[in-house]
Amino acid sequence: MTQRTWRIGLTGGIGSGKSTVAGFLARRGAAIIDADAISRSLTAPGGRAMADIAHTFGKALLSPDGAMDRQAMRERIFRDSQAKRQLEQIVHPLVSQITAEQAQAAMQNGHRVLVFDVPLLVESGERWRKQVDRVIVVDCDTETQTQRVMARSGLVSAEVARIMAQQASRSQRLACADAILVNQGLSFDDLDAQVAQLAADFGL
Ligand code: ADP
């Protein structure tokens, strides 16, 4: 009997340990499709969204190297309420297209578990939810999140708090979860053991 293909959305607030879990799942044979990396590649020099971005927003939104000037775009979105939607109308279909290409390639390479690593899955509403069979949320308390991000990035706690305020709340995220990985007070080995248990449900 051929094994079914699972499409799993993996999400979690900044510092929850989502990337760590993605790494553990990859070691067990899952294909990881990284939505943020796809999105960034679209607006990098030569990225597939750049011609449309230049056409829609003009040269002022381009860096000298041909990438999107992120700071200029943030300022534009702050001033112009339409700009965010216009940018999303360019970027979202391309993200969907590249995601589908990567999923197809992973299946052709024999992967039967496709993990879509999407930091803002919950924030995207139905957009990502409808593309996956299950949602896994990596969870820890906000204090732990803050400490991890500060240690990793050198940001001060007010800056981390500002990023977290732009993300869904812990309870909103948990409300969307089909499975929760609690990454708190655990060693990496303990976390990996939890991942192994969950992965077994998907045939890994
Ligand atoms: P996210 O992708 O959710 O932002 P990461 O997986 O990058 O989070 O983890 C944030 C930081 O916390 C990383 O430096 C990671 O090594 C560390 N970390 C994650 N889980 C644990 C854990 N169980 N024990 C110790 N450090 C952890």
Image: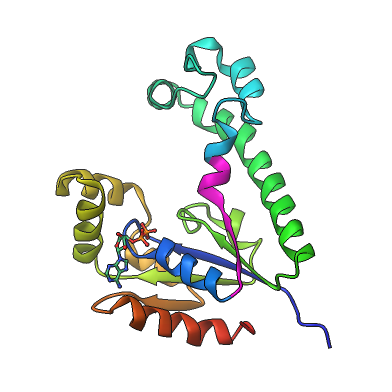
Q: Does 31 lie within the magenta span?
A: yes
| Residue at 54% across, 30% down | 44
Q: Does 146 lie within the magenta span?
A: no
The residues colored magenta run: 29-39
Q: Give the position of the C terminus as an image quadrant.
A: bottom right
- 117 with respect to 91 (left or right): left
Please state the horizontal and vertical placement of residue 174, each as a whole percent of the image.
Answer: 40, 71
- 47 with respect to 70 (left or right): right
Between 63 and 14, the residue placed more toward the observer is 63
Colour scheme employed for the rendering of this structure: rainbow
Q: Give the position of the N terminus as an image quadrant.
A: bottom right
* 140 shown above or below 196: above
| Residue at 57% across, 87% down | 200
Please state the horizontal and vertical placement of residue 182, each as a whole percent of the image.
Answer: 35, 77
Please state the horizontal and vertical placement of residue 131, each as a whole percent of the image.
Answer: 66, 61
* 65 shown above or below 151: above
What is the quadrant of residue 187 in the picture? bottom left
**Total of numbered circles in the picture?**
0
* 169 shown above or below 29: above
| Residue at 61% across, 24% down | 50
Between 159 and 122, the residue placed more toward the observer is 159
Please state the horizontal and vertical placement of residue 145, each as a whole percent of the image.
Answer: 25, 61
| Residue at 48% across, 78% down | 179
Ligand 1's quadrant: bottom left
Residue furthest to the top: 59
Between 105 and 12, the residue placed more toward the observer is 105
